[in-house]
Amino acid sequence: MRILETVLLMTLSQFVVAQDMPEVGKEVNPQDVLELISVSRILWTLFFIIAGYIAVKIVTKVLEFFAEKSSKFRITIKGLIPVIRILLWTAIIFWIIKGIFNPPMEMLLAGLASVAIAVGLAAQDLLKNVFGGLMVLIDKPFQIGDKIQVGEHYGEVMEIGLRTTRIQTPDDSMVVIPNMELMNSSVSNTNTGALDCQVVTEIFLPIHTDTQIARKIATEAAQVSKYIYLNKPIVVLFNNEMHNKKSFLKMKVKAYVMDIRYEFPFQSDITETIVSELLKQRVVHQEDLE
């Protein structure tokens, strides 16, 4: 359970409860605080926290299941998961405070002030990460399902929490990035909420390669790939690069795939097809590619 997320939601809920309470002019009495605490209330609180945690997990798993079953709506459904999780925790904490304890407003405000001071002094970095997480959810530079580049890390966004964001890299590693780092770094988004995305495949060729034939082969290789999204253009570009004091022709094939998860299978697919056709048509020779 994310303790930080729970604390934040409790704070938000306390504000809501405070606005529904009538203003009372008396000071907070320690005896009043003790009267609110009882074994039954503590047990009910633990019950609702555990039940709420299980409920949030179940709802999250169900949404993830349906998201994976429907590729068309996968990114949309996954983008709603962080918001739904926060709303559920808000409802759970509101019910605990309002339904179980129901404290007077002055007691609520005193407790809220104490929590704010303690958290502010002891967890400044955590608060920065929480603020970063809220900004990600509000500003939406990316969402769950997008493929992003943050520094040296590139992968699919799997989870956006209040403290960290998790991305899965092409080698199936899970990278946990503090939200504060996301606020202070440049983030490159490959598909920006869309299911399709552009994929750039680079192939180095001998400098004497016939670019017209190579372009035709590359375009056809992309067109016949089972991963291609033909509603968007295929572009083939060439430029000269030097490696080990030797000049090469770098061919870039820019095309779109139907699903961001086809990025690397598509690159592999068209690379194999292009190289095979270049050799078959004797545009290049085996020694040129070694």
Image: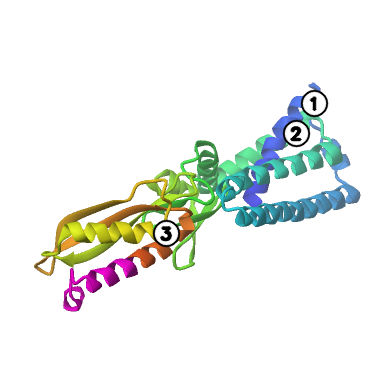
In the image, which residues are magenta? 271-290
Q: Earlier in the sequence, mark 1 or mark 3?
A: 1
Q: Amino acid at mark 3?
A: Glu
Q: Circle 1 is placed at which residue position?
A: 21
Q: Does 205 sit above or below residue 166?
A: below
Q: Are marks 1 and 2 in contact (CB under 8 Å)?
A: yes
**Residue drawn at point x = 42 percent, y = 46 percent:** 231
Q: Is residue 273 magenta?
A: yes
Q: Does 77 sit above or below residue 16?
A: below
Figure disc tally: 3
**Of discs 1 and 3, which sits in the foreground?**
3
Q: Circle 2 is placed at which residue position?
A: 108
Is there any visible trace of residue 84 in the rendered image? yes
Q: Circle 3 is placed at which residue position?
A: 263
**Residue drawn at point x = 89 percent, y = 51 percent:** 39
Mark 1: few, some, or many residues within 10 Å (few <14, many ≥20)?
Answer: some
**Residue drawn at point x = 42 percent, y = 59 percent:** 263
**Of discs 3 and 2, which sits in the foreground?**
3
Task: Give the alpha-carbon distance from disc 1 to disc 3, as whole Å.
Answer: 55 Å
The image position of residue 222, as x and y in percent, is 35, 58
Task: Give the alpha-carbon distance from disc 1 to disc 2, as whole Å.
Answer: 10 Å
Q: Amino acid at mark 2?
A: Leu
Q: Name the residue at the front extreme.
A: 281
Q: Quadrant of residue 247?
A: bottom left
Q: Amino acid at mark 1?
A: Met
Front-most of 94 and 259? Answer: 259
Front-most of 52 and 276? Answer: 276
Task: Give the alpha-carbon distance from disc 3 to disc 2, as whole Å.
Answer: 52 Å
**Residue drawn at point x = 33 percent, y = 61 percent:** 221
Name the colouring of the figure: rainbow
In the image, is 207 to the left or to the right of 195?
A: left
Which quarter of the rendering shows the N terminus? bottom right
